Image (cartoon, grey):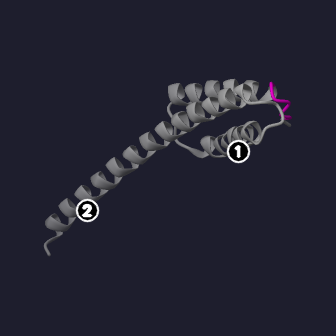
Amino acid sequence: MPDEELRKKTRKAMTRAGEALDRMEKTGTTFFLTDLDLAMTMTRIASDAPEDSQKRARNQANARHAYDTISRISHQAALTENERREVDNKLAELRSALEQFGEQFT
């Protein structure tokens, strides 16, 4: 294979890899925001359930798990400044909702 053809194929492959990475990063941001919205829905469901019910405990635990997971992995994600701000704002909102249930954060 001639050198020029190899260089063209290499450039195309690198371009495709960069585009795939961009799509993955965008999907990651969408995942964080969607998961945070879902966790907020769980806190609303939990707040409507009787205090000693399994429904309340289950939804509260699932929302807390989402908070802990996203808090841990979102800082490793390549987010734009605006995306980071949006994720952090939603995390703060979820944390506040969880504190209403007596959740402790260190």
Residue occupying the far bottom of the picture: 1
Q: Amino acid at mark 1?
A: His
Q: With 34 as the anchor, is 11 left or right in this view? A: left
Viewed as shown, does residue 8 lie left or right of 84?
A: left
Secondary structure at badge 2 equals helix
Residue at numbered disc 2: 10
**47 magenta-colored:** no
| In the displayed structure image, the side of residue 22 where residue 51 appears, left or right | right
> Residue 34: x, y in percent?
52, 35
Q: Is residue 103 magenta?
A: yes
- Element at badge 1? helix
Type of amino acid under label 2: Thr
Looking at the picture, does residue 101 appear above or below residue 31? above
**Residue at (76%, 42%) from the top-left corner?**
54
* Nearer the camera: disc 2 or disc 1: 1
Q: Which residue is mark 1?
A: 65
In this picture, which residue range is highlighted in magenta? 100-104
Is the C-beta separation of discs 2 and 1 under 8 Å? no
Q: Disc 2 versus disc 1: distance between alpha carbons?
A: 42 Å
For residue 95, above or below residue 35:
above
Q: Is residue 54 above or below residue 93?
A: below
Taking the spot 34% from the left edge, 55% from the top edge, the residue there is 17
Prevailing secondary structure class for the magenta stretch in the rendered image: loop
- Which of 6/88 is in front? 88
Task: List x then y, in percent, for residue 69.
Answer: 67, 46
Name which quarter of the figure residue 61 lies in: top right
Residue 87 position, x and y percent, is 58, 30
* Between discs 2 and 1, the one toward the N terminus: 2
